[in-house]
């Protein structure tokens, strides 16, 4: 066992303390919202609640799930995230694979063209006019089509594909496999780390995107959960939270607009929190490989 010097011990202690404080500062806001969501609204307004509920209740979640907007927005977000991840990974892998084929004419020019289009943008108003003219501002596909291709995702996947030996492609081609079959049966099975990494990037981006639904979607019933959460956080009255339903004094004791907002925050963030640990090991591996080979 290696004996550490006094300076090394001091460094380890200081490093541990600083990292512990950083971890606490990162985790505590999430814990605070969770505690507030399980506490009676009127009691929470009194303050002094930091680590556990003082007046435990499930009424905040009961009232939240009675709001029909929650289920509609969750369905939109789940469908958007699922379809967006599958479509995004498929098209990104197609373009990335094509640009790793050395016999493709102009592949360097294609890469430069993809990069060049990321430098300039027309602005929000021209973008909205384009979406309106295409009929996407009143369609679910507003969330899918504009985000099919992302240049940074393309770069990460192309770098990873370049780590796969060229001999595998050549041997598969000699056996009569076409490019699509080589991609699906050779490249993608060997690329699980980068696929999981990009799936996490794309999924979190779709799930947390409230801006598109708030400013570009004209149909309220097609707004995703993140947009609903943003709207609810801006609502200040119990009447707005209950969509016109009467709120008695007893209800105000068990929940308030703030406590309902906390419940909505937990409902809409928990899916990502639950999924992330299962993809974390692939995420770290994919990013490290991309960084080393890049």
Image: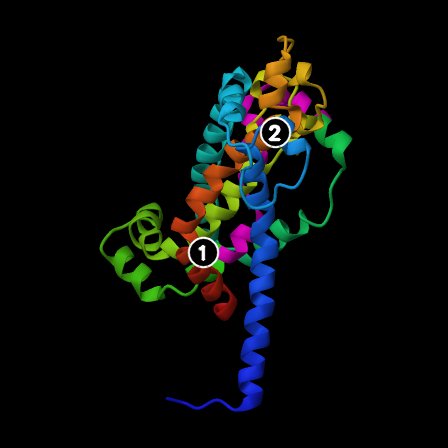
Q: Is residue 120 left or right of residue 273?
A: right
Q: Which label lies toward us, 2 or 1?
A: 2
User: How dense is the environment of label 2, judged by Cα within 10 Å: few (below 14), some, or many (20 and up)?
Assistant: many
User: Which of 187 and 248 lies nearest the eye of the viewer?
Assistant: 248
Secondary structure of the residue carrying numbered label 1 = helix
Residue 38 rendering spot, x and y as whole percentages: 52, 33
| Residue range (magenta) | 129-156
Residue 256 rendering spot, x and y as whole percentages: 64, 24
Q: Is residue 154 magenta?
A: yes
Secondary structure of the residue carrying numbered label 2 = helix
Tell me if residue 135 can be seen.
Answer: no
Q: Relative to residue 107, is residue 272 depicted above or below?
A: above
Find residue 259 and name its label. 2
Residue 150 rendering spot, x and y as whole percentages: 57, 46
| C-alpha distance separating marks 2 and 1 | 34 Å
Q: Residue at x 61, y 21 (%)?
A: 253
Please say which color scheme the image uses. rainbow
Q: Quadrant of residue 233?
A: top right
Main secondary structure of the magenta stretch: helix
Q: Residue at x 43, y 43 (%)?
A: 274
| Residue holding disc 1 | 283
User: Which of 263 and 160 lies nearest the eye of the viewer?
Assistant: 263
Q: Relative to residue 226, is residue 120 depicted above or below?
A: below
């Amino acid at each position: 066992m290696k004996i550490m010097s006094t300076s090394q011990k001091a460094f380890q202690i200081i490093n541990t303390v600083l990292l512990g404080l950083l971890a606490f500062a990162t985790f505590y806001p999430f814990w605070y919202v969770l505690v507030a969501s399980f506490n009676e609204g009127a009691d929470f307004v009194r303050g002094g609640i930091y680590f556990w509920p003082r007046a435990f209740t499930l009424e905040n979640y009961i009232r939240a799930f009675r709001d029909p907007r929650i289920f509609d927005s969750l369905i939109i977000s789940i469908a958007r995230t699922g379809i967006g991840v599958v479509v995004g990974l498929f098209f990104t892998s197609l373009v990335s694979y094509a640009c790793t084929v050395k016999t493709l004419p102009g592949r360097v020019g294609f890469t430069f063209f993809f990069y060049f289009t990321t430098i300039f943008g027309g602005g929000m108003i021209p973008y909205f006019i384009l979406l309106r003219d295409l009929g996407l501002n009143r369609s679910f596909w507003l969330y899918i089509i504009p985000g099919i291709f992302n240049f940074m995702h393309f770069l990460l996947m192309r770098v990873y594909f370049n780590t796969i030996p060229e001999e595998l492609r050549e041997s598969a081609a000699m056996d009569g496999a076409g490019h699509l079959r080589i991609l699906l049966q050779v490249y993608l099975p060997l690329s699980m780390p980068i696929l999981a990494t990009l799936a996490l990037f794309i999924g979190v981006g779709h799930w947390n995107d409230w801006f598109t639904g708030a400013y570009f979607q004209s149909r309220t019933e097609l707004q995703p959960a993140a947009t609903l959460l943003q709207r609810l956080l801006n609502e200040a009255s119990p009447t707005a939270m209950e969509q016109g339903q009467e709120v008695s004094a007893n209800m105000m004791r068990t929940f308030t607009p703030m406590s309902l907002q906390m419940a909505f925050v937990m409902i809409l963030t928990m899916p990502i929190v639950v999924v992330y640990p299962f993809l974390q090991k692939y995420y770290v591996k994919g990013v490290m490989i991309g960084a080393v080979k890049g």
